Image: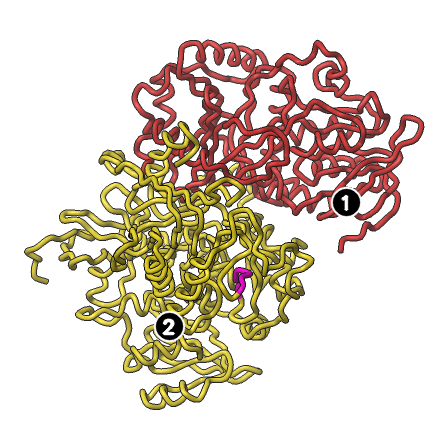
Chain colours: A yellow, B red
Amino acid sequence: MVEPAGPSFTFEGRRYPIPPGGTVLEALAADGLPSFQRSPRYHRPRAPLCGLGHCTGCLVRVGGRPNVRACRYSPADGDVVSTRNAWPSRRFDLLAAFDLLFPSGIDTLRGFRRPAWARGLYQAVVRRLAGFDGPPSPDAASGPVDPPTVRRADVVVVGAGRAGRAVAERLVAGGRAPLLLDRGRSAPAIPGAELLPDTTVTFLPPPGPADPPFSLLGFTEPARGLWIRAREVVVAVGSYDAALLFGSNDRPGVLTADAAFALDRPGAAPAFRAGVVFGAGPRARAVVERMGDRIEALIAPGAVPPELVRACSDAGIDLHPRSLLLAAHGRRRVRAVDICARARGPVARLPCDAVVLAHRRLPHVPILFQAGARMQWRPEPGAYFPVADSSGRTTVPGLWVAGSVAGPSTDPAADGDRVARHLLAGGPAPGAPPASLPSSPAEAPPAPPFPGEMDGYYRELLRLPRRGRWVACPCEDVLLEELEAVPQRGYRGVEVAKRYSGLGTGLCQGRYCLPDALLVLSILEGRPPADVGYITQRPPVVPTPLSALAALDPIAATDGGP
Amino acid sequence: MTVLARDRYAVAIVGAGIVGLFTAYRLARAGAGPVLVVDRGFLSGGASGRNGGGVRQQWETRATVRLARESVADYRAFGREFGYNIWFRQGGYLFLADTPSELEKLRGVTEIVRAEGLPARLLDADGVDSLVEGLARGAVVGGAYLGSDGTLYPFPAVWGVYEAARSLGVEVALGVEATGVTQRDGRVTGLVTSRGSVAADRVVNAAGGWSGDFARRAGLPVPNVATRHEILATEPMKPFLDPMVVRASDGLYLSQTMRGELVGGLSLPHPPGTGGGMSTSPQFLPRMARTVTALFPALGALNVLRAWSGFYDDTPDGLPVLGEDPRLAGFVHANGFGGHGFMLAPATSRRVAAAVLGTASDLDPALFGPGRFLDPRRAAPVERLQLG
């Protein structure tokens, strides 16, 4: 490789040119799908799963700062990027022996109790297996911390995707000056609206009778604190592609459609050349339309709609409708998958180098749970959504939802425009319950019928013999068997399952484990997912650096906020 | 719908936290007859699932030092007895002093602990630096340290005692709220719950932060006050901090769990009572972040994953309330632990079980008995080492 002449960073002794405005992951992905992280307990090779800055598949250390997401971080010239969760080296990690030594899992709950004299040794080893990296080094915090952003706003719009932008544009046209927040860095400006990119927020405390009722605490990458008070908030944070349970579902090459799109960039080598797609909805169709030449087969839990059949046929993609995805093969990279037709079909092996998960698109609801909005389970796609009327009003006065976070949406921009028109026409005064919404659980709409498609899918799949590790929570390496042990030992509800198994306590805050865990628990407990519950969404809903929060203390101490 | 299995119990315990479960377990082992435990929430939903897992033997009160020492022995043997690994790691408890006068207070504590035969040490600033890495220069003038103190992982302790109690026939009814007691001729005759009344010869109030609420509903007001305390957890790291670090001046405590997370909190002046719920205040995250980064400057780049809160069950003198209420025979207190129920439950539950069974124990009623609050002179703090 030719040493780059322009700005560059180093990763494991090699210099990489910094793509203009690009991230560490984009630079490392120039040669294909990069796999540089190891899982915490079993030291299994990991690659990016989500491409959205939530999973732990692309964590790196930048200088002295640990747990930086390569997919979110724009390197500076001279940055030293590394990974630490391997010994003696990333390519040859002896700690991967834990994967082989504990084929049925490391039981930290009931194991390691005998002999008593070995307790110290067990503690030292298990303690070392936790986490991905050591603490920050002293130089990591030595730079100046930017003064925090403090605002009082009329309307805050969280999310600058299609729905959020449409909301902001309509509000500007109606004479309002919204503050628009986006987690990404590249949302284009909207004249008349203030845009804060690279920004995440949490409701703190949950909205109450105070005026203005909303207090949003958050930060702007890398560490600028943020505290906003607002009269009204529109949440338009969109949706994401779910993970899936099957054998070796954590292998490099198993990635969500979000990640497949994020990695599919002009000039970069493709992340895969012969993938399989799982799913048959609009998202699977989008994958087929954009990357059909690199897709060998489409596996669907149910029927495949005629237009997707045609698209696959045009692209030469084999169809496997009504099929179960049983397991992936390969260690450092997916090399094949085992599938079988539902109702006990024979097992077939499909060679491939990637599994693109496009079967279930879920709303980013943690922020809505945390805001205290009433939520309701919908069997399709199998997720909680906010209870909201057609204008986007939630059960929290002054809190609105727009776009795919409110429900499956075919035209998020039109949704956003409609919600903003209602908001302009006069939302309810703060403190007054919206007239058109039920105000007590007794008046809530009847619980929707259950089950949905994935419920039937998992009912069948979980009865079959298994091979490979079924990773229920990739952040903490919690296995499906550990989740299944919870109801088997007589405990009920997802709150206890979280405390028993550790599931949902990792860096992704449950985004890639909870949706499937709810279905599994619902099946094993014999009651609808809505009765299994949801784990309390604790602030901050996105990991937030201590330095950003610390800079907000003088504001909190003097007058209780902006 | 939870339906209670019987209409008559020997003992009904309010609260399925670690204190109530340990008491139920000891009573069942002693053959006390049918034991019922009711809890309004889910298992580990209260302070037993919300605490930082600290277990210390450094106290100002010698009787408490002895109870804590016994609990340490119990937790060391927990895996053998209960089948769950609670990862009790004796990495020590380090009390930090940021002023010479704080250090003098700690000297008094150290002397009391040493008088009980435990090798607590008073440290100067260099001694503190040798135990924790990354401490800011000049942040402390010294500290007090006992290496056999430590931290455990609270959840498996709850599962272990819960399962052991159930296997001995204890009935644990979750989602059932205790709303009062029935009585006749100065004796408890039963427990009133959200699912109806049951007869019970003894009722134990082990309701943690809700102990004061339940005592009032039972017509036996106590001076216990529920105070909300907040706590946070960071993303996991490789081992970095061995001891639990505590600072009396602001109530800071911080430890690293076996899962690698830094877990800790500090005291904020929240309104007393359980009415405000268990949410996180906007002041806590900034204050805690500023405090931690002032003490450990390198940790600024560390991410906070989540914050939550729970209730301490505080008493005016800083000591728990253990034993039968002099106003109502058969009503037994196991509360007022002030945030230390988890670390004291194994030992105190033996004394509470003895009080229920009417057998002798070494518990000093003048120090721990509920009758002490009937004497208005006994409102002064006795145990001031409250936090951490």
In this picture, residue A331 sits left or right of residue B271: left
Residue at disc 2, secondary structure: strand
Residue at point 62%, 66% (across, down): A523
Residue A220 visible from this viewpoint: yes
The amino acid on which the numbered mark 2 sits, given as a three-letter code, is Val
In the depicted structure, whether residue A402 falls above or below residue A359: above
Residue B235 percent location from the top left of the image: 40, 44
Is residue B72 at all visible to an observer of this figure? no
- The chain letter for the residue carrying disc 2 is A
Amino acid found under the numbered disc labelled 1: Leu
Residue A241 is situated, as x and y percent measured from the top left of the image, at 41, 67
Q: Chain of mark 1?
A: B
Per the rendered image, the range of residues in magenta is A383-389
Question: Which residue corresponds to mark 2?
Answer: A356
Residue at (55% x, 46% y) in the render? A431
Q: Nearer the viewer, residue A161 or A88?
A: A161
How far across and how far down the image is residue A402, in percent? 44, 62
Mark 1: which secondary structure? loop
Most distant residue in the right direction: B185
Mark drawn on residue B168: 1
Mark 2 vs mark 1: give the one in front: 2
Q: Residues within 10 Å of mark 2 (few under 14, many from 20)?
A: many
In the figure, residue B283 lies in which quadrant? Answer: top left
Q: Is B274 inside the magenta-drawn segment? A: no
Residue drawn at x 50%, y 27% is B267
Query: How many residues crowd around disc 1 within 10 Å: few (fewer than 14), some, or many (20 or more)?
Result: some
